[in-house]
C-alpha cells in the first residue's frame, strides 16, 4: 500500500510540474501576443515606426493570427484549469489514502493486541484444565 501512495505522490508531482510549465508557457504566449516580449537588450521591441507601418499593411493576416492565438490561449486556459482540478483531486485522494492507511494500521494493531490477549487467556485456560485433570487422576 505504501508503494501505491509513493507512486501517486510521484505522479502528482509530475502533474504539478507540467502545470507549472504550461502556466509559464501560457504567460509567455500572452506577453508575446500583447507585444510585451523583450528584445535582446532587455527593452521592449516596440520601437521602429517603419515596422509598425508594415504591421498595419499585414493587419488582415495578423487578425487571423490573433484569432488563432486567442483560440489557442483559451485552449491552454481550459487545459490549465483541467490540470489544476486533476491535481487538486489527486492531492485529496492521496491524503485520504494516507488517512485510511493510518486507520488500517491502528485497527490492525488493536486486533493483534486483542488476539495476543485471547491467546494468553486460552493458554491460561488450558493450563488450568490440565491442572484440574491432574488433580482428578490422583
Image (tube, rainbow, N blue to C red):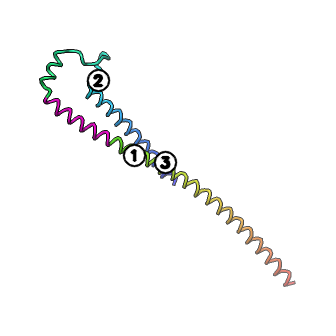
Q: CA distance from mark 1 to mark 2?
A: 30 Å
Residue beneath the point at 79% across and 73% down: 127
Q: CA distance from mark 3 to mark 1?
A: 20 Å
SS majority, magenta: helix
Q: Residues within 10 Å of mark 1 (few under 14, many from 20)?
A: few
Q: Are marks 3 and 1 in contact (CB under 8 Å)?
A: no
Residue beneath the point at 25% across and 29% down: 33
Residue 60 position, x and y percent, is 13, 29
Query: Which label belongs to residue 6?
Result: 3
Q: CA distance from mark 2 to mark 3?
A: 40 Å
Residue in front for this viewpoint, 7 or 104: 104
Q: Which residues are magenta?
A: 60-78
Horizontal side of 59 relative to 103 (left or right) equals left
N-terminal-most mark, 3 or 1: 3
Q: Is residue 72 magenta?
A: yes
Element at badge 1? helix
Q: Are marks 2 and 3 in contact (CB under 8 Å)?
A: no
Q: Residues within 10 Å of mark 3 (few under 14, many from 20)?
A: few
Residue topped by disc 1: 85
Query: Which label belongs to residue 37?
Result: 2
Element at badge 2? loop
Query: Which label belongs to residue 67?
Result: none
- Of tags 3 and 1, the one toward the viewer is 1
Amino acid at each position: 500500500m505504501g508503494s501505491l501512495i509513493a507512486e501517486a505522490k510521484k505522479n502528482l508531482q509530475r502533474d504539478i510540474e507540467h502545470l507549472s510549465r504550461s502556466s509559464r508557457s501560457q504567460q509567455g504566449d500572452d506577453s508575446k501576443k500583447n507585444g510585451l516580449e523583450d528584445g535582446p537588450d532587455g527593452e521592449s521591441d516596440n520601437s521602429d515606426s517603419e515596422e509598425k507601418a508594415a504591421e498595419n499593411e499585414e493587419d488582415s493576416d495578423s487578425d487571423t493570427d490573433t484569432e488563432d492565438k486567442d483560440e489557442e490561449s483559451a485552449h491552454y486556459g481550459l487545459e490549465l484549469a483541467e490540470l489544476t482540478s486533476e491535481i487538486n483531486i489527486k492531492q485529496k485522494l492521496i491524503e485520504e489514502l494516507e488517512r485510511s492507511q493510518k486507520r488500517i494500521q491502528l485497527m490492525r494493531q488493536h486486533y493483534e493486541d486483542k488476539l495476543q490477549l485471547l491467546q494468553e487467556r486460552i493458554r491460561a485456560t488450558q493450563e488450568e484444565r490440565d491442572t484440574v485433570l491432574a488433580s482428578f487422576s490422583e
